[in-house]
Structure formats: C-alpha cells, structure tokens
Amino acid sequence: MSSDDGEKVYKEIVKTLHDGQKVALSFEGAEVISAFLNVAVGQLYNGQFAEDFISSNIRPINAPPDDLHLLKRVVERAKVFYKDPERIKNANKEILGDER
Amino acid sequence: MIRMFGRIESTDDGFSQLITLHNLIPSCPDKVCEIDLTAVSWFDANMCASLGAILYPFPKDGWKIKILGMKPAIEGILQRNGFLKNFGFNRPKISDLNRTTIEYQKFDRTDSSAFTQYVERHFVGKGIPQMTKALKKEFRKSISEIFGNSIEHSQTEHGIFACGQFYPRYNRLDFSIADLGVGIMNNVNKKTGQSLNATQSIEWAMSGSNTTKSDISGGFGLKLIKDFIMHNGGKIQIVSNNGFYQYHKDSVRTKLFKEPFPGTVVNIEINTADKNKYCLTSEVVDPNKVF
C-alpha cells in the first residue's frame, strides 16, 4: 500500500474521529509499509488530536506481529517528530546532508 | 540382494524398514550388497539422511553397496538431492527448478559453520510460515544447535548426515539430521543413573526441563522448534537406539522397535499449509498499547 493509499485512510480516520466514533484499523490482507503508515497514522499526531484521545479511540485489529511492530515504530517516531518538526528536519539535513 | 517394499516414509514404519536394511546388509555374501528398490513405490527424500548414515560405514569397511531398480520418480528425487552420486551414479545433476530440495550432505565433526551456511542457504522459502526477522534467526540457530548437540552427544566419528524436502502437494517440509553415535539412552542413563528404555530416554530428554548439561543440553536445542511445531501443527520425530518418538499437535506417540537404529535421527516436519505469522514471545506487541 502506497502513501497515496495512506492519505485516503488518514482522511477516513480523521472524518470518523470528528464524527465522534471510534476507529478499528484492520490490517487484514493488507501489505503495509512505513511510507503508508507514516501518512495514514503518523499524521494524526500533527496536533489536531491529543495523544490520549488517539490512544483511546483507535485500535489496530487483525495485525500480524511484524505489522504491529512497524505501527508502533511509526507511532513513536510521529510523536517525536510532531513535537518539534523543524528540529527533526534540521537534524536530518545535518545527518543526510540534505539541503533541499 | 536385499529387496525393499512399499513406501519408505518419515514414519515409524519407514524407519523400521531402514533398521531392517541395516541389519540385513552384513548377511550379504562377498561384501557386496545390492539394494533392490523395484517394489518401492515412494521414498521420502529426507529419509536419505538416515539411509546415508546407515550405509556410510560399509564402503569404508570394503563393502560395495549398489542401489538398483529405482522407479524414475524416485531416481529423480535422489539424483536431485545429490544422494545417488555417493553410490556410484555418475549422472548429471538435475536442477532443482522448483527449489523444493534440501540437498543430502554429510558433515564432519568440525563442519559446524558449513552446516550453518547450509541451513541459511536451504531454509529460505520452501513453504516455511512467515516469521519475524528475529524468530527466523533464532529458528535457524536452533537447527544449527541440533547439529552441535548431535556432535557433542553422539561421540560419533562418522559425522552428521542431513537432508530435507519440501512436499508442496502434501503441505509439508521435512528435514532430517542423523548420526551414528551412541544414542540418547546411553547418554541419559549414564548421566542420571537411571535404567530408562530408549523411548523413555527420548521423552526424558524432550521434556525440556531435563538436562544433564554436558550431554543432553536443553533437549537437543529443540525447545524453540518444539514451541513452533506445537503452534504450526507439524511434527518432531526422534529415532534413537530402538526408540521412536513423535511429537504432533501437543501429544506424544512412542514405539519400541525390535532392533536398534545405529545412532540417532531427528526429523522436523513443518506444516506448510499454516498461514499464520510467527514472532518470538519477547516481540509480542500489545495492540492496546500501540497508540
């Protein structure tokens, strides 16, 4: 699943949460990669929802161990990133020499 | 000439047939033994590890061993896994196009790194259920531990014999490791001072908590494999001395053969129809604590 697919899922999650409903994020039959999860789930930590709100309203279901690990890593990275996105971007520039 | 019959499979009956063969060879005249497989309709390729172990000492003792009358399908399997070239069949190797073969190989006592490479080369694909990287690494390490334990416990000078086969039609992957050592019963009874028979000794060693450390350490290194097999629905079979032990779906079946196998065989059968994904317990992530 691509980052474009991730954007669709992200929008659906946001809409569902705004409607006051809980989200069950099913991994059944899905081949997920971090690029997909960064967009679908990582973006949720950009400040529009509180972390506590996210943790009490979203649950992964039917996720194999590998995918759960990946999801956990994506969530942990997103929490750090969105706390100070500029600092992380600058750190990446320093490490990767990426001036773009 | 020794005639073999029927199906030689990874079962108590299959091992029993190989034990009978082993006992009959010395009665062949002039140190020439022809093994006639005309009436054999099937031969599980992984049983080559046990057959290879049984036959190995004879040529060193001046015997000529010939295998005759193989059906084309059996000859193809035994040629593909490299078994027949050890018995005077100088035919070109058949490519393993479907990558179902774990080649027959004999390892010396000092070949542990070669065995590890062999496991890494062959335990890829072949229907093995999906595992996390960490489990895959531990699983392969456990297979290599069986080798190390065989070397240590068996005290064999003949080396270790390994062979396996993925049977896509039957949804199974079998892998056998055989030695020509002193057997489990001798080790267990010597270390514990008990008088257990062959099957009781295997059960004792397989119970997990039992270990004599220097000899039967951690139940052959099979703990992780046994845990996996329990969930996977596969089998572990052990033949040692005159004992047969089979672990399948969390139950154990044992049998005492009339005559002993001249060493020990560990056969691991993986259920390749299993579509579950596996990880180590330490890797389990609580889905309620992801976000």
Image (cartoon, coloured by chain):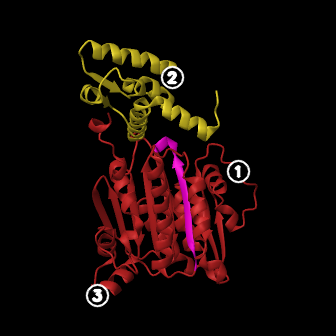
Of residues B99 and B118, which is closer to you in this image?
B118
Of residues B31 and B97, which is closer to you in this image?
B97
Q: Residues in magenta?
A: B158-171
User: Is residue B169 found inside the magenta-colored segment of the image?
Assistant: yes
Q: What percent of the width, then of the height, locates residue B211?
A: 33, 75
**How far is the residue under mark 2 from the one under mark 1?**
45 Å
In the figure, the yellow chain has which letter? A
The answer to whether mark 2 and mark 1 are in CB contact below 8 A is no
Chain B: drawing colour: red
Q: What percent of the width, then of the height, locates residue A95?
A: 60, 41
Instruction: Give the foreground label among 1 and 3.
Output: 3
Instruction: Give the foreground label among 3 and 2.
Output: 2
Left or right: B150 as drawn, with respect to B109? left
Amino acid on which the number 3 mark rests in the picture: Gly
The answer to whether mark 3 and mark 2 are in CB contact below 8 A is no
Question: What residue is shown with label 1?
Answer: B94
Which circle marks residue A3 in the picture? 2
Question: What residue is shown with label 3?
Answer: B193
Dot 2 falls on which chain? A
Amino acid on which the number 2 mark rests in the picture: Ser
Choose the circle earlier in sequence order: 1 or 3: 1
- Quadrant of the frame with the C terminus of chain A: top right
Residue ID at (46%, 18%): A7
